[in-house]
């Protein structure tokens, strides 16, 4: 089987024809950003070992929220040394596809269900990741970078964990050093992986007290966005930031940069619980509107 670069039916905000599903935020602008608020493009499942709820419960939650599309995007990682497993094995992915395909059929009259992957990049295991990605037909490939090898090479730092031991380990290395590595490596990930959407640009170190990704990192963020633009990726506008810090990921200045480059935006909840499907989508539209003005 080959890797597909298929995008979902409502994934591009600059699609030539506006459908009723797409919200045009600025009808007066020539290239009005639009995205569908009827599609949640970033959903996890119990298979990743840190989300809860059956796939079917996420689908029912999406239907109840009035969504027309739900895209599961499950965690793939390679070569990570960490005290717990927060990703799927290949056997887990087999089960994920088996169950996902059955549910696609069961709910085809109610909602479009798609099966994708959120690949966590690893500079030392890129060959393995590329081979595993090639083995299956994904509806969407999202690119992330969650685990950074500790400078002493002993184990990995989880850059998006809320656990105290992870937060302390990052502090010991130095938040600035970690963030610089994050942006550089994520840019490499976008260049190397066959993805179609960047999952989290500024979610790294989100639970680190006192760390704010601000314009000090603008040059690195610009390089990353240029790589996203060059690969014709889209860019997730993530709801969870509203829960964690009362703003979405991505931050306002990053969103402005992305919009200036005409990078398509996709709403995604990054739900790890069925009740979080479609969360904060109303705020995302409002926030994006602000970033365009
Ligand atoms: Zn996760
Ligand atoms: Zn995710």
Image (cartoon, grey):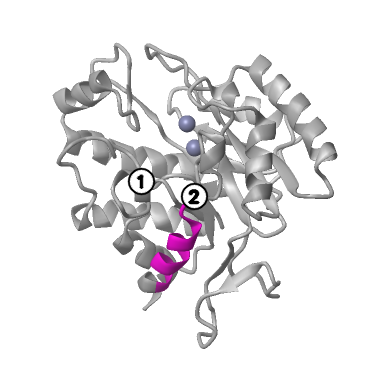
Q: Quadrant of residue 181?
A: top left
Q: Position of residue 95 (x, y in %)?
A: 71, 20
Magenta range is 279-289
Query: Is residue 93 shown left or right of residue 34?
Result: right
- Ligand 2 within 8 Å of the CB at mark 1: no
For the residues labelled 1 and 2, the Cα–Cα distance comes to 9 Å
Q: Mark 1 sits on what residue?
A: 243
Q: Position of residue 254 (x, y in %)?
A: 34, 59
For the point 29% across and 39% down, the residue is: 206
Q: Secondary structure at mark 1?
A: helix
- 278 or 164: nearer the eye? 278
Does residue 224 appear anywhere in the picture?
yes
Q: Mark 2 sits on what residue?
A: 279
Query: Is residue 81 shown left or right of residue 212?
Result: right
Q: Is residue 90 shown above or below 231? A: above
Give me the disc on residue 208. none
- 260 or 289: nearer the eye? 289
Q: Quadrant of residue 200?
A: top left
For the point 52% across and 20% down, the residue is: 49
Q: Is residue 75 shown above or below 154? A: below
User: For the image shown, how many numbered marks are present on the structure?
Assistant: 2
- 161 or 196: nearer the eye? 161
Pointer 1 with pointer 2, Cβ within 8 A:
yes
Residue placed farthest to the front in the image? 64
Q: Judge the density around disc 1: few (<14), some (14-19), many (≥20) Cα neighbours within 10 Å.
A: few
């Amino acid at each position: 089987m080959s890797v597909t670069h298929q995008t979902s039916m409502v994934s591009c905000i600059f699609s030539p024809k506006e459908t009723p599903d797409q919200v045009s935020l600025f009808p007066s602008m020539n290239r009005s950003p639009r995205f569908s608020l009827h599609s949640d493009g970033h959903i996890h499942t119990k298979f990743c070992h840190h989300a809860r709820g059956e796939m079917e419960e996420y689908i029912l939650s999406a239907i109840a929220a009035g969504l027309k599309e739900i895209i599961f995007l499950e965690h793939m990682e390679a070569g990570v040394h960490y005290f717990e497993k927060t990703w799927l094995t290949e056997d887990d992915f087999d089960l994920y596809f088996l169950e996902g395909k059955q549910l696609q059929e069961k709910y085809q009259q109610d909602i479009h269900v798609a099966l994708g992957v959120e690949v966590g990049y690893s500079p030392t295991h890129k060959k393995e990741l590329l081979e595993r990605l090639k083995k299956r037909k994904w509806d969407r490939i999202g690119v992330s970078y969650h685990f950074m090898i500790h400078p002493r090479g002993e184990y990995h730092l989880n850059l998006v964990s809320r656990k105290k031991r992870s937060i302390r380990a990052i502090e010991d290395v130095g938040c600035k050093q970690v963030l610089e590595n994050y942006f550089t490596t994520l840019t490499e990930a976008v260049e190397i992986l066959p993805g179609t959407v960047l999952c989290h640009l500024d979610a790294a170190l989100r639970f680190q007290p006192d760390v704010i990704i601000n314009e000090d990192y603008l040059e690195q963020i610009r390089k990353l966005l240029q790589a996203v633009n060059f690969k014709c990726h889209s860019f997730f506008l993530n709801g969870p930031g509203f829960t964690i810090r009362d703003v979405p990921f991505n931050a306002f200045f990053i969103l402005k940069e992305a919009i200036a480059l005409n990078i398509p935006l996709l709403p995604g909840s990054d739900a790890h619980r069925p009740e979080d499907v479609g969360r904060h989508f109303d705020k995302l539209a409002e926030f994006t509107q602000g970033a365009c003005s």
